[in-house]
Protein backbone atom coordinates (compact mmCIF):
# COMPACT_ATOMS: atom_id res chain seq x y z
CA UNK A 1 0.00 0.00 0.00
CA UNK A 2 1.25 3.45 -0.89
CA UNK A 3 1.68 5.38 2.39
CA UNK A 4 0.24 8.51 0.77
CA UNK A 5 -3.14 8.85 -0.91
CA UNK A 6 -4.24 11.96 -2.80
CA UNK A 7 -7.84 12.92 -3.35
CA UNK A 8 -7.64 14.26 -6.90
CA UNK A 9 -11.02 15.98 -6.62
CA UNK A 10 -9.71 18.11 -3.76
CA UNK A 11 -6.15 18.58 -5.07
CA UNK A 12 -5.67 21.97 -6.79
CA UNK A 13 -2.13 21.29 -8.01
CA UNK A 14 -0.54 24.05 -5.90
CA UNK A 15 2.67 21.97 -5.54
CA UNK A 16 3.15 22.90 -1.88
CA UNK A 17 3.37 19.24 -0.93
CA UNK A 18 5.81 18.51 -3.75
CA UNK A 19 8.13 21.33 -2.76
CA UNK A 20 8.04 20.43 0.94
CA UNK A 21 8.61 16.67 0.59
CA UNK A 22 12.05 15.90 2.12
CA UNK A 23 12.37 12.59 0.25
CA UNK A 24 11.20 13.88 -3.15
CA UNK A 25 8.59 11.18 -3.60
CA UNK A 26 5.77 13.51 -4.63
CA UNK A 27 5.32 14.97 -8.10
CA UNK A 28 2.76 16.81 -10.21
CA UNK A 29 1.12 15.13 -13.17
CA UNK A 30 -1.69 16.65 -15.18
CA UNK A 31 -2.04 19.36 -12.56
CA UNK A 32 -2.49 16.95 -9.67
CA UNK A 33 -0.16 15.69 -6.94
CA UNK A 34 0.91 12.06 -7.09
CA UNK A 35 3.01 9.92 -4.77
CA UNK A 36 5.78 7.60 -5.87
CA UNK A 37 5.63 3.99 -4.77
CA UNK A 38 8.83 4.15 -2.72
CA UNK A 39 10.97 6.54 -0.72
CA UNK A 40 8.29 7.99 1.57
CA UNK A 41 9.41 8.34 5.20
CA UNK A 42 5.85 9.06 6.37
CA UNK A 43 6.88 12.38 7.93
CA UNK A 44 3.48 13.89 7.20
CA UNK A 45 4.71 17.20 5.79
CA UNK A 46 2.49 16.81 2.74
CA UNK A 47 -0.53 16.07 4.91
CA UNK A 48 0.20 19.05 7.15
CA UNK A 49 0.82 21.59 4.40
CA UNK A 50 -2.01 20.79 1.98
CA UNK A 51 -4.48 23.72 2.04
CA UNK A 52 -7.30 21.54 0.71
CA UNK A 53 -6.90 18.53 3.00
CA UNK A 54 -6.46 16.38 -0.09
CA UNK A 55 -3.72 14.14 1.31
CA UNK A 56 -4.02 11.23 3.72
CA UNK A 57 -1.43 8.98 5.33
CA UNK A 58 -2.65 5.44 4.83
CA UNK A 59 -1.15 3.96 8.01
CA UNK A 60 -2.23 6.70 10.42
CA UNK A 61 -5.50 8.12 11.73
CA UNK A 62 -5.91 11.57 10.19
CA UNK A 63 -8.03 13.84 12.37
CA UNK A 64 -7.30 17.21 10.74
CA UNK A 65 -6.24 18.89 13.98
CA UNK A 66 -5.24 22.53 13.44
CA UNK A 67 -1.64 23.48 14.20
CA UNK A 68 -0.72 25.69 17.15
CA UNK A 69 2.28 27.96 16.66
CA UNK A 70 4.97 28.13 19.33
CA UNK A 71 4.71 31.90 18.95
CA UNK A 72 1.51 31.68 20.98
CA UNK A 73 3.74 31.05 24.00
CA UNK A 74 5.40 34.09 25.54
CA UNK A 75 9.09 33.61 24.79
CA UNK A 76 10.35 35.50 27.85
CA UNK A 77 8.15 33.47 30.19
CA UNK A 78 9.18 30.24 28.49
CA UNK A 79 12.89 31.08 28.72
CA UNK A 80 12.59 32.09 32.37
CA UNK A 81 10.78 28.84 33.17
CA UNK A 82 13.45 26.80 31.38
CA UNK A 83 16.18 28.65 33.28
CA UNK A 84 14.34 28.02 36.54
CA UNK A 85 14.03 24.25 36.26
CA UNK A 86 15.97 22.21 38.80
CA UNK A 87 16.74 18.53 39.10
CA UNK A 88 14.41 17.22 41.81
CA UNK A 89 15.54 14.63 44.36
CA UNK A 90 12.81 15.07 46.97
CA UNK A 91 9.25 14.07 46.15
CA UNK A 92 5.84 14.12 47.80
CA UNK A 93 4.06 10.88 48.56
CA UNK A 94 1.49 11.61 45.87
CA UNK A 95 0.78 9.66 42.68
CA UNK A 96 0.97 11.23 39.24
CA UNK A 97 -2.45 11.30 37.61
CA UNK A 98 -3.00 9.15 34.53
CA UNK A 99 -4.05 12.16 32.47
CA UNK A 100 -0.73 13.83 33.20
CA UNK A 101 1.18 10.67 32.32
CA UNK A 102 -0.68 10.58 29.01
CA UNK A 103 0.29 14.16 28.24
CA UNK A 104 3.93 13.49 29.17
CA UNK A 105 4.15 10.52 26.83
CA UNK A 106 2.29 12.34 24.07
CA UNK A 107 4.92 15.10 24.21
CA UNK A 108 7.64 12.50 23.76
CA UNK A 109 5.75 10.79 20.94
CA UNK A 110 5.71 14.01 18.92
CA UNK A 111 9.41 14.77 19.32
CA UNK A 112 11.19 14.72 15.94
CA UNK A 113 13.29 11.67 15.10
CA UNK A 114 15.88 11.25 12.38
CA UNK A 115 14.27 10.16 9.13
CA UNK A 116 10.95 10.05 10.99
CA UNK A 117 12.08 6.69 12.38
CA UNK A 118 9.85 7.07 15.46
CA UNK A 119 12.12 4.53 17.14
CA UNK A 120 11.82 5.69 20.75
CA UNK A 121 10.11 3.53 23.37
CA UNK A 122 8.89 4.28 26.90
CA UNK A 123 8.76 1.80 29.77
CA UNK A 124 6.85 2.75 32.92
CA UNK A 125 8.28 0.61 35.70
CA UNK A 126 5.00 0.61 37.62
CA UNK A 127 4.57 -2.55 39.69
CA UNK A 128 8.20 -3.55 39.05
CA UNK A 129 9.72 -0.24 40.15
CA UNK A 130 10.78 -1.52 43.59
CA UNK A 131 12.29 -4.65 42.04
CA UNK A 132 14.28 -2.64 39.50
CA UNK A 133 15.56 -0.29 42.20
CA UNK A 134 16.58 -3.22 44.41
CA UNK A 135 18.68 -4.66 41.56
CA UNK A 136 20.42 -1.31 41.10
CA UNK A 137 20.98 -0.76 44.81
CA UNK A 138 22.55 -4.21 45.24
CA UNK A 139 24.79 -3.59 42.24
CA UNK A 140 25.99 -0.22 43.50
CA UNK A 141 26.56 -1.48 47.04
CA UNK A 142 28.82 -4.21 45.70
CA UNK A 143 30.62 -1.64 43.58
CA UNK A 144 31.02 0.66 46.56
CA UNK A 145 32.75 -2.03 48.59
CA UNK A 146 35.16 -2.70 45.75
CA UNK A 147 35.74 0.87 44.60
CA UNK A 148 35.59 2.99 47.75
CA UNK A 149 39.28 2.56 48.60
CA UNK A 150 40.16 4.01 45.19
CA UNK A 151 37.42 6.58 44.51
CA UNK A 152 36.79 9.34 47.05
CA UNK A 153 33.26 9.96 45.77
CA UNK A 154 32.20 6.40 46.58
CA UNK A 155 33.33 6.83 50.18
CA UNK A 156 31.02 9.80 50.72
CA UNK A 157 27.71 8.63 49.26
CA UNK A 158 25.15 6.65 51.20
CA UNK A 159 23.34 4.11 49.06
CA UNK A 160 19.91 3.85 50.67
CA UNK A 161 17.13 1.55 49.47
CA UNK A 162 15.64 4.55 47.61
CA UNK A 163 18.96 5.83 46.24
CA UNK A 164 17.91 5.61 42.59
CA UNK A 165 14.25 6.73 42.52
CA UNK A 166 14.13 8.91 45.66
CA UNK A 167 10.65 7.68 46.57
CA UNK A 168 9.13 9.16 43.40
CA UNK A 169 5.86 7.59 42.22
CA UNK A 170 6.68 7.47 38.50
CA UNK A 171 9.74 6.19 36.66
CA UNK A 172 9.86 6.21 32.87
CA UNK A 173 12.74 4.50 31.08
CA UNK A 174 13.33 5.96 27.62
CA UNK A 175 15.02 3.60 25.19
CA UNK A 176 15.93 3.55 21.53
CA UNK A 177 18.36 2.38 18.90
CA UNK A 178 19.58 5.94 18.47
CA UNK A 179 20.83 7.95 21.45
CA UNK A 180 20.00 11.32 19.91
CA UNK A 181 16.36 10.52 19.18
CA UNK A 182 15.71 9.15 22.66
CA UNK A 183 17.55 12.01 24.36
CA UNK A 184 15.58 14.63 22.44
CA UNK A 185 12.33 12.86 23.28
CA UNK A 186 13.36 12.87 26.94
CA UNK A 187 13.75 16.63 26.85
CA UNK A 188 10.21 16.95 25.47
CA UNK A 189 8.98 14.68 28.26
CA UNK A 190 10.71 16.80 30.90
CA UNK A 191 9.34 20.10 29.61
CA UNK A 192 5.80 18.73 29.61
CA UNK A 193 6.24 17.25 33.09
CA UNK A 194 7.52 20.58 34.41
CA UNK A 195 4.56 22.42 32.85
CA UNK A 196 2.24 20.08 34.78
CA UNK A 197 3.82 20.98 38.12
CA UNK A 198 6.00 17.88 38.30
CA UNK A 199 9.71 17.55 39.01
CA UNK A 200 12.16 15.37 37.13
CA UNK A 201 15.43 13.62 37.90
CA UNK A 202 17.49 12.07 35.11
CA UNK A 203 18.87 8.99 36.87
CA UNK A 204 22.21 8.50 35.17
CA UNK A 205 23.13 5.86 37.73
CA UNK A 206 20.19 3.73 36.55
CA UNK A 207 21.46 3.96 32.99
CA UNK A 208 24.84 2.70 34.18
CA UNK A 209 23.16 -0.26 35.88
CA UNK A 210 21.15 -1.08 32.76
CA UNK A 211 24.39 -1.29 30.81
CA UNK A 212 25.90 -3.70 33.35
CA UNK A 213 23.04 -5.87 34.59
CA UNK A 214 21.49 -8.46 32.33
CA UNK A 215 18.92 -9.12 35.03
CA UNK A 216 17.77 -5.50 34.89
CA UNK A 217 17.61 -5.50 31.09
CA UNK A 218 15.50 -8.64 31.20
CA UNK A 219 13.11 -6.98 33.63
CA UNK A 220 12.75 -3.95 31.34
CA UNK A 221 11.69 -6.06 28.34
CA UNK A 222 13.02 -3.47 25.90
CA UNK A 223 12.18 -3.70 22.19
CA UNK A 224 14.74 -5.61 20.16
CA UNK A 225 17.85 -3.55 19.49
CA UNK A 226 16.96 -0.87 22.04
CA UNK A 227 19.18 0.34 24.86
CA UNK A 228 18.38 2.53 27.84
CA UNK A 229 19.18 6.15 26.99
CA UNK A 230 17.57 7.94 29.93
CA UNK A 231 15.71 7.05 33.10
CA UNK A 232 13.29 9.78 34.16
CA UNK A 233 12.23 9.87 37.81
CA UNK A 234 9.06 11.97 38.08
CA UNK A 235 6.78 13.20 40.84
CA UNK A 236 5.50 16.21 42.73
CA UNK A 237 8.44 18.08 44.30
CA UNK A 238 8.55 18.42 48.08
CA UNK A 239 11.07 21.26 47.77
CA UNK A 240 10.74 24.74 46.27
CA UNK A 241 13.63 26.71 44.85
CA UNK A 242 13.67 30.47 45.22
CA UNK A 243 16.00 31.78 42.54
CA UNK A 244 17.61 30.96 39.20
CA UNK A 245 21.13 29.58 39.59
CA UNK A 246 24.07 31.15 37.73
CA UNK A 247 25.70 29.44 34.79
CA UNK A 248 29.09 29.65 33.16
CA UNK A 249 29.40 32.06 30.24
CA UNK A 250 27.89 30.90 26.95
CA UNK A 251 30.40 29.05 24.79
CA UNK A 252 29.71 30.13 21.23
CA UNK A 253 31.59 31.32 18.21
CA UNK A 254 30.63 32.31 14.68
CA UNK A 255 32.55 30.79 11.80
Image (tube, helix red, strand yellow):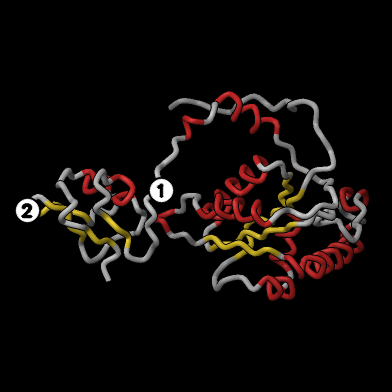
Question: Does any portion of residue 203 appear in the rendered image?
Answer: no
Image disc number at residue 30: 2
Q: Marks 2 and 1, Cα distance to the nearest angstrom?
A: 30 Å
Residue 63 horizontal/vertical position (percent): 39, 55
Image position of 1 with respect to 249: above or below: below
Q: Secondary structure at mark 1?
A: loop
**Image spot of residue 151 (x, y percent):** 86, 52
Figure quadrant of residue 245: top right
Q: Nearer the viewer, residue 205 or 254?
A: 205
Left or right of 42, for residue 145: right
- For residue 226, above or below residue 112: below
Work out which residue is located at the far left of the displayed protein and give it: 30
For label 1, count other residues whose C-alpha is less than 10 Å away and answer few (under 14), some (14-19) or many (20+): few
* Front tag of 2 and 1: 1
> What residue sits right under mark 1 in the picture?
65
Nearer to me, 128 or 74: 74
In the image, taking residue 197 as reference, residue 39 lies left or right, namely left
The quadrant the C terminus occupies is top left
What is the secondary structure assignment of the residue under circle 2? loop
Amino acid sequence: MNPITVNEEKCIGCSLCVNDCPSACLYLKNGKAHAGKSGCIECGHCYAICPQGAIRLSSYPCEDEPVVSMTELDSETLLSAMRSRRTIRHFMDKPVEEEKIRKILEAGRYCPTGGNSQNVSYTILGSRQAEAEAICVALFRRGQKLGAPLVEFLKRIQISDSFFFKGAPLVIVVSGKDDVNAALASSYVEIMAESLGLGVLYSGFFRVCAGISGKLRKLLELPKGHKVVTCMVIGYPSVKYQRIVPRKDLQMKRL
